[in-house]
Image (tube, grey):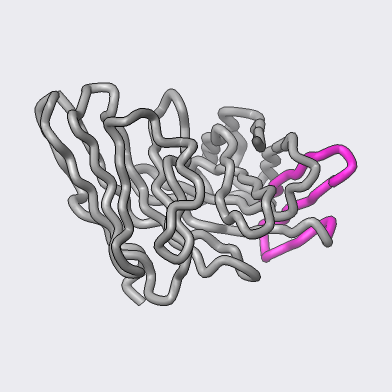
Amino acid sequence: GENVEQHPSTLSVQEGDSAVIKCTYSDSASNYFPWYKQELGKRPQLIIDIRSNVGEKKDQRIAVTLNKTAKHFSLHITETQPEDSAVYFCAANSNFGNEKLTFGTGTRLTIIP
Amino acid sequence: DAGVIQSPRHEVTEMGQEVTLRCKPISGHNSLFWYRQTMMRGLELLIYFNNNVPIDDSGMPEDRFSAKMPNASFSTLKIQPSEPRDSAVYFCASSLGQPTRTIYFGEGSWLTVV
């Protein structure tokens, strides 16, 4: 089955700086890679996703890149703000017709004012 | 839409008791997932239904856990008997499936077994 590794487990950045979180996956058949944000005590919520037919996707301050050859994908947050503090999870889905996601172990991002 | 609705939001129970968690998926969604979240193991998929049929239950820890989806608008996850190591947040989630594939999570059921 799919295995997703995520690094780093914790990350602290100064407000206004950029943050980068990286994930690798094992199944070359994986074709859908969402990122979820989970605030303390809340549910995970989708912030951005990318499919295997594109290499990069951007939404305002958030961008995701995908390297299928190397089997890794990354989340980039620019101009970080205090409200970006949360746990971020990457995920991958490998089977067409099977919608289950395998999640990474999460990155706790802290924005330092 | 009200989103994925779970109940109870919080439950404290004694070891050995039966626990039933309930979920109402988003109307029109044909996939339903039960995830468990703990500090040690992160987000684990327990079981996944498509059109009310269990597709993948490889994550169900053991026979003490069972899940049902009798219709498109309701699912249960049952633990019998419960043990302290079952303490976790249990999330139900639903999805429209292809092509959007976005999975929407409920607020979670916070279970403590003492």
Q: Position of residue A20 (x, y in %)?
A: 70, 41
Q: Using the image, determine if residue B104 lies above or below residue B89.
A: below
Q: In which quadrant will I find the N terminus of chain A?
A: top right
Residue ranking furthest to the right: A69
Left or right: residue A18 compared with residue B63: right
Query: What is the quadrant of residue B18 in the picture?
Result: top left
Say whether residue A59 is magenta: yes
Say whether residue B72 is magenta: no
Judge whether residue B112 can be spotted in this image: yes
Query: What is the quadrant of residue B23 in the picture?
Result: bottom left
State the residue at coordinates (52%, 35%). A108
Mark count: 0
Q: Look at the magenta stretch and give its main secondary structure.
A: strand
Left or right: residue B34 compared with residue A79: left
Left or right: residue B31 compared with residue A7: left
State the residue at coordinates (13%, 25%). B16
State the residue at coordinates (39%, 30%). B61
State the residue at coordinates (17%, 40%). B19
Magenta segment, which residues?
A: A54-77
- Along the line of sight, the residue nearer the viewer: A113 or A97: A97
Q: Position of residue B45 (x, y in %)?
A: 47, 41
Q: Position of residue A31 (x, y in %)?
A: 74, 53
Judge whether residue B104 can be spotted in this image: no
Left or right: residue A94 compared with residue B16: right
Q: Using the image, determine if residue B14 lies above or below residue B21.
A: above
- Along the line of sight, the residue nearer the viewer: B33 or A85: B33
